[in-house]
């Protein structure tokens, strides 16, 4: 059966980097027997300019009917003053997550041995970082109701957002984290603020319960979010799998990925219960270097590997892509963002070609 | 007029470090004309053991009637299984903050030049970090109602916390940040999540408004919290004053202080509109080294300096304490937490005595 993909290049460098990922897919199709077909659709600011909405119905339908979605990047300064209800990042990303029920966001933060020097951390602290942040993605304060700003009778304004989790939402994200830990070093650290928030107490309680009952072989620890933000800096290697809420996960996964110094290389996956998923680099749309061949396509190519692994069940081909990326890095190939001082940098397309050659 | 202080040593190393701070106060009283008197009271787990409550009424009354509160540290494993409504950190700290209306939490994150090597960051990234995090402390999701966990008819449980800010709450914390920036390098970065949360949009709007109308001389920028967590790692020196909500401030100030590598040296202040304040080290109660003379009293001594500066208006004496601490560090004196490999470490009391001698 042909795997059906939706490819959404998006804004800024999105089209540049997605083009290289599609090169890789094309080679896997032509030479390695990957049975895959894809269709492109606009999303984000580009879609807003074309259709008046950052997530057009046709794009959403395509994404829903696909086995997996490959997304480039979304947003840019020209859309920053749009009304809240039309802002590309919010509407397109949150819309896709919610509509496809992509509740599990996997964000690996891994240091590539060749790029240890790109980290702000001392080499001995950075070397060997390999964390998988599992972030809940379709609930919590991002989606909780009631929400909004109202004017009080005395003229003051009052803003409200609601942090809401139900036990079943916590159970399913906990299971994802435990399953992943089983395939890694068997440790999960659940991050919350149970000393202050009732939602966090429920979170801690449910995660513990799932762990004890269904994953007694996985080691579970709990950490407060403020301490986690510190421990990530002090000794990131203590972490294997971290599982947390939407908001804490947003903050901690960004902190963790910046620690690696390899932000142009980090992929992410957002999965639904049915195995569908959306795959995207964690970096942004970098409008300042869009269209001029300077973007690093490796994070998107590695996102494609995650797609093969998690949604298409093509583990062998996923491994192959990851080995190819490791190879080009070992060969010293660098896009400008990861080139050290005095190192020669190659362009977006050259990097894509190099990965293809290494396949 | 005699400055009246409430001294609350608390748990773990709290009494050890507060003792040294009181030595310093005693010398300032005896030799430098500081007109000060203080009274001690129990707080935290110690207070719970003595009275059945982590924040006894007598302690609260003492704190309310004082010009300033000096707090050691609160909490420890023996109280970790107490019911939520009796947990020392939560009840004592949140109780004091709310009852004294300590809405402005100032948390400097500063690298001491002698201790650059204690940071997990590369020396060139760490050197010169000097950030003041201004955290809102009496509102937001910490105190918002409604809150709690309920059982749904279908047996699932649902947890709720409310993130609430009113415009006047945002105005007053913004003013504190702008005022402080005027005395520093004149830049404020306000951190929010305005691309997702309505409360953050209100926050951004109000902070901008206060800035434009009352502090046109201060440079104001805005940053999303996930990006702030990254930028703190990538290039912490870009920040001068950061202002943010209670929850984001909890996370970012801990991250920032860990970046400095000098966590045993960092003080904090929590201020009310009337100038009263509570002063405490940012580190915890470290029960494993309590009572054995290994704790570092410098953060508490520097908290005392902040107290003189912000609540007692004794700027000259505050400077004097800070210079004395700089002196002992320059002299190479180190408690175990900050001693480098092979460096001789001194004890808590010796360190306090050294500061006194340097005064
Ligand atoms: C753009 C924004 C809505 C989004 C989020 O907060 O989830 C982004 O920061 C991310 O992490 O994907
Ligand atoms: C102990 C806890 C309630 C407290 C907080 O979250 O405010 C602590 O982390 C702090 O930062 O003072």
Image (cartoon, coloured by chain):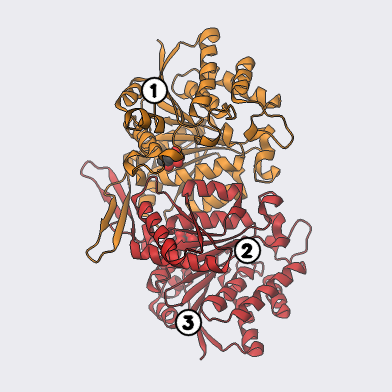
Chain colours: A red, B orange
Q: Which of B209 and A304 is in front in this view?
A: A304
Residue at 31%, 23% in the rendered image? B58
What residue is pinned by disc 1?
Answer: B41
Residue A67's tag is 3
| Same chain shared by disc 3 and disc 2 | yes
| Vertical comparison of B124 with A24: above or below | above
How crowded is the residue under tag 2: few (<14 C-alpha within 10 Å), some, or many (20+)?
many
Tell me the element at label 3.
loop
| Vertical comparison of B221 with A116: above or below | above
Tell me the element at label 1.
loop
Residue B167: give x, y in percent of width and height. Answer: 32, 42
User: Seen in the image, is B276 located left or right of residue A339?
Assistant: left
| Vertical comparison of B235 with B16: above or below | below
Tell me the element at label 2.
helix
Residue A247: give x, y in percent of width and height. Answer: 43, 56
Q: Nearer the viewer, residue B122 or A179?
A: A179
- Compute the Cα span from label 3 to label 2: 26 Å
Q: Do the residues labelled 2 and 1 touch (CB within 8 Å)?
A: no
Quarter assignment of residue B69: top left
User: Seen in the image, is A217 located left or right of residue B339?
Assistant: left
What residue is pinned by disc 2?
Answer: A264
Residue B332: give x, y in percent of width and height. Answer: 71, 27
Residue A326 shows in this picture? yes
């Amino acid at each position: 059966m042909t795997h059906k993909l939706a490819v959404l290049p998006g804004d800024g460098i999105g089209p540049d980097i997605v083009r290289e990922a599609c090169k890789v897919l094309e080679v896997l199709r032509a030479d390695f027997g990957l049975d895959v077909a894809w269709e492109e659709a606009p999303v984000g600011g580009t879609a807003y300019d074309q259709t008046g909405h950052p997530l057009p119905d046709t794009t959403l339908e395509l994404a829903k009917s696909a086995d997996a979605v490959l997304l480039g990047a979304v947003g840019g300064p020209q859309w920053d003053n749009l009304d809240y209800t039309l802002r590309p990042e919010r509407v397109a990303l949150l819309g896709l997550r919610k509509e496809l029920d992509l509740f599990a966001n996997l964000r690996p933060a891994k240091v590539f041995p060749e790029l240890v020097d790109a980290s702000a951390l001392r080499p001995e602290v950075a070397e060997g970082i390999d964390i998988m942040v599992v972030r809940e993605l379709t609930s919590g304060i991002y989606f909780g109701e009631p929400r909004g700003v109202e004017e009080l009778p005395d003229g003051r304004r009052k803003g409200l957002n609601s942090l809401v989790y139900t036990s079943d939402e916590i159970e399913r994200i906990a299971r994802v984290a435990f399953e992943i830990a089983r395939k890694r070093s068997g440790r999960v650290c659940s991050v919350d603020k149970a000393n202050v928030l009732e939602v966090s107490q429920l979170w801690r309680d449910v995660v513990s319960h799932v762990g004890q009952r269904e994953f007694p072989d996985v080691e579970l620890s709990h950490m407060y979010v403020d301490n986690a933000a510190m421990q990530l800096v002090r000794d990131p290697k203590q972490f294997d799998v971290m599982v947390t809420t939407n908001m804490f996960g947003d903050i901690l996964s960004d902190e963790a990925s910046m620690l690696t110094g390899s932000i142009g290389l980090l992929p992410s996956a957002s999965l639904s219960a049915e195995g569908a998923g959306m795959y995207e680099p964690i970096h942004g749309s970098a409008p300042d270097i869009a269209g001029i061949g300077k973007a690093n396509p490796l994070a998107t190519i590695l996102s494609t590997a995650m797609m093969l692994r998690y949604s298409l069940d093509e583990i062998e081909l996923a491994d192959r892509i990851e080995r190819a990326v490791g190879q080009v890095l070992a060969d010293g190939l660098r896009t400008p963002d990861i080139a050290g001082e005095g190192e020669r940098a190659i362009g977006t397309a050259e990097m894509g070609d190099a990965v293809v050659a290494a396949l």
